[in-house]
Amino acid sequence: MSSKDINTDTLIRYLDGELQGRELADIEQAISENPSLQQELESLRSAQLLVKSYGLRQQVGNIHAQMMEELKATQPSGTPVRSLFTRGFRVAASIILVIGIAAAYQYATLSARNLFDANYTAYSIHQTRGEQAASRLEQLYLHDSMQLITTVFPNTKEPSQQDYFYTGNAYLQLGNAPDAIRLFTLLQQKNAATNQHMLEEDTEYYLAMAYLLNREPGKALPLLTQIHNNPQHLYHDKVSSWFLLKAKLLRDK
């Protein structure tokens, strides 16, 4: 199966888990080799998530089935071809209307806080890369002592990049976005001053999340775009096209 043989219906069947065996293997290989198919698949997946989010999957499924029945039905002799297309157009318009209502509702209810809640996952210590012996603040973070971290940090002499990072994440978990932003920004400044890249990509992601929590999607967007556009970024998989689209909508809302 070449990429030219794959249409939207085939991609939908793939998303719905209807393909098996050789056909499944062929389409997965074609998708992996064709950026255009990857982009279309992502768009279809986003549309599916939109419908599922608001309980419209069944309604759209019924309308889709109706359209398929009408289009597959054998046309009676003497029936104008125009009538078939009229019915198909009417059903297709109904699908667009249902999805449009869902999209309008999602846009109306979209907020930076909702986007944060839907995508935020607290930093896990096992994600640490290339760090040495655990500092006191890291140990506190391991024991989920977020409030204590914010008390200890101000009294820490010459805090390291890790200290700034763990304290920023502690503030983020406590819902204190301004202080989280302040600590992550200080970490970036410390890295720049010492020509280091300590926890650089981790900081970019969690700083973006802190901006969302602080209702500043315009400041989060450049960071999220940078992460999304870099397949090698540690957090690339966390910033989907759908996530990025919502951030853009929030910026312009």
Image (tube, helix red, strand yellow):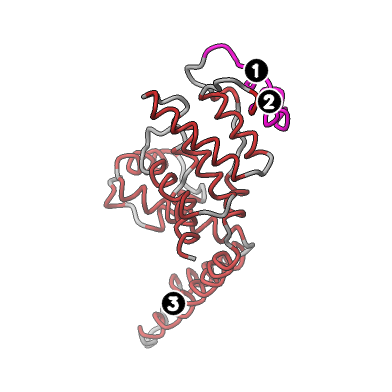
Which residue is painted at 31% across and 46% down in the image?
35
Q: What residue would you read off at disc 2?
A: 152
Helix, strand or loop status at disc 3: helix
Residue neighbourhood size for the residue with mark 1, other residues' Cα within 10 Å, grouped as few (<14), some (14–19), many (≥20): some
Q: CA distance from mark 2 to mark 1?
A: 9 Å
Residue neighbourhood size for the residue with mark 2, other residues' Cα within 10 Å, grouped as few (<14), some (14–19), many (≥20): few
On screen, residue 158 versus residue 37, left or right, reads right
Task: Confirm or deny contact between disc 2 and disc 1 (CB under 8 A).
Answer: yes
Residue 97 in percent (x, y) is at 52, 75
Q: What residue would you read off at disc 3?
A: 88
The residue stretch that appears in magenta: 132-153
Quarter of image, res 140:
top right
Question: Magenta residues: mostly which secondary structure?
Answer: helix
Which residue is painted at 46% across and 74% down in the image?
92
Helix, strand or loop status at disc 2: helix
26 vs 92, nearest the viewer: 92
Q: Amino acid at mark 2?
A: Val
- Of circles 1 and 3, the one toward us is 1
79 vs 71, nearest the viewer: 71
Task: Confirm or deny contact between disc 1 and disc 3 (CB under 8 A).
Answer: no
Q: Mark 3 or mark 2, which is nearer the start of the sequence?
A: 3
Which residue is painted at 49% across and 37% down in the image?
185
From this view, report whether residue 101 is shown above or below residue 216.
Answer: below
Q: Amino acid at mark 1?
A: Arg
